[in-house]
Image (tube, rainbow, N blue to C red):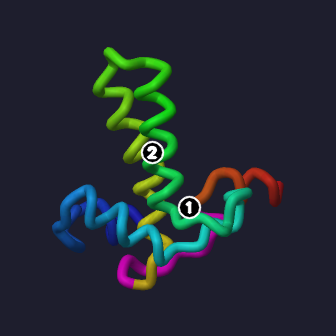
Amino acid sequence: MREGYGKLDNVEMSIWECCELLNDVLDESDPDLDEPQIEHLLQTAEAIRRDYPNEDWLHFTGLIHDLGKVILHPSFGELPQWAVVVDTCCAQN
């Protein structure tokens, strides 16, 4: 896996493009499957902004916290859910 992803040469995109790409990903561990992933990212960032208004780095962290799930997407190798999402991985053990 390190060989396939360690070079960081698979694609170049903006953070927003990556957020939008996550809308094509189904995270089986997410309790709110009716909402697109981007909605979850925005809600998380907004909740953190409300609770910690002076911590802009934390708002950004809330926005990007699930971007790693992009490797579930077919254009990034479509890795199995258990290999990417911690909630799913740990629930199976």
Residue 65 got which mark? 2
Q: Nearer the viewer, residue 29 or 42?
A: 42
Residue 84 got which mark? 1
Q: Give the SS element for disc 2.
A: loop
> Left of 70 or right of it: where is 12?
left
Q: Tell me the crowding category of disc 1: few under 14, some 14 to 19, or many 20 or more residues within 10 angstroms, Cα based.
A: some
Which residues lie in the magenta part? 75-83
**Residue type at numbered disc 1:** Val
Give the vertical position of 24 relative to 49 (above or below). Answer: below
Q: Quadrant of residue 6?
A: bottom left
Q: Tell me the crowding category of disc 2: few under 14, some 14 to 19, or many 20 or more residues within 10 angstroms, Cα based.
A: few
Q: Is disc 2 in contact with disc 1, using a CB cutoff of under 8 Å?
A: no
Residue name at image x 44 percent, y 84 percent: 74
**Residue type at numbered disc 2:** His
Residue 4 got which mark? none
Residue name at image x 45 percent, y 60 percent: 38
Quarter of the image with the C terminus in it: bottom right
The percent position of residue 45, horizontal first and vertical second, equals 43, 38
Give the vertical position of 58 relative to 79 (above or below). Answer: above
The percent position of residue 65, horizontal first and vertical second, equals 45, 45
The percent position of residue 58, horizontal first and vertical second, equals 37, 27
The percent position of residue 55, horizontal first and vertical second, equals 33, 19
Residue name at image x 36 percent, y 68 percent: 20
Q: Nearer the viewer, residue 92 or 35?
A: 35
Of callouts 2 and 1, the N-terminal one: 2
> Left of 11 or right of it: where is 67?
right
Q: Quadrant of residue 82?
A: bottom right
Q: Nearer the viewer, mark 2 or mark 1?
A: 2
